[in-house]
Image (spheres, helix red, strand yellow):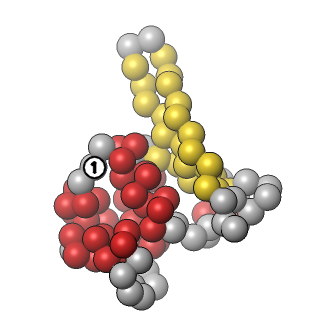
Amino acid sequence: MHDDEKHAVLTPEMCRAARAFLDWTQADLAERAAVSRGTVRDYEADAHAVHRSTPTLLRKALEDGGVTLESRQDGGLVLVQVRRGGDGHAARTTDFSNT
């Protein structure tokens, strides 16, 4: 992962999608990111400004859970989850536009 990819912003929409890919509840993500469930709820709802470290903590937890967020050349982001099955690897991708 390049430094610019590492620092791409995790949007509320991407957070919800990544959490859904992992089949995690907001409480699951909160526990893994060491934040409150209310913080996850408010971030995903884009309810108000959150502490500047919150997106980084959420992104790290999601990536540790198996989701990869990659920057596209056109400025968008791609969310990729790879799961291992009995017959190899299966991947799902979702593109997000920054526009």
> Relative to the observer, which residue lies in front, 53 or 42?
42
Q: Quadrant for residue 32, please give it.
A: bottom left
Give how far across and how far down residue 52 sits, in percent.
45, 85
Q: Which residue is mark 1?
A: 24
Q: Quadrant for residue 27, please give it.
A: bottom left
User: Looking at the image, can residue 52 be seen?
Assistant: yes
Q: Residue at x 62, y 49 (%)?
A: 95
> Relative to the observer, which residue lies in front, 57 or 45?
45
> Relative to the observer, which residue lies in front, 6 or 8?
8
Task: Give the mark count.
Answer: 1
User: Looking at the image, can residue 51 be seen?
Assistant: no
> Relative to the observer, which residue lies in front, 79 or 60?
79
Q: Residue at x 43, y 30 (%)?
A: 83
Secondary structure beneath dot 1 equals loop
Q: Residue at x 56, y 40 (%)?
A: 93
Q: Residue at x 50, y 22 (%)?
A: 89
Task: Identify whether 91 is placed above or below 61.
Answer: above
User: In which quadrant of the rendered image does the C terminus lie?
Assistant: bottom right
Q: Report the amino acid beneath label 1.
A: Trp
Looking at this view, name the residue that lies furthest to the right: 73
Give how far across and how far down residue 25 sits, in percent.
24, 54
61 displayed left or right of 4:
left
Looking at this view, name the residue that lies furthest to the top: 87
Give how far across and how far down residue 2 sits, in percent.
70, 58
Disc 1 crowd rating (10 Å Cα; few below 14, some 14-19, many 20+) is some
28 displayed left or right of 22:
left
51 displayed left or right of 30:
right
Give how far across and how far down residue 19 sits, in percent.
36, 52
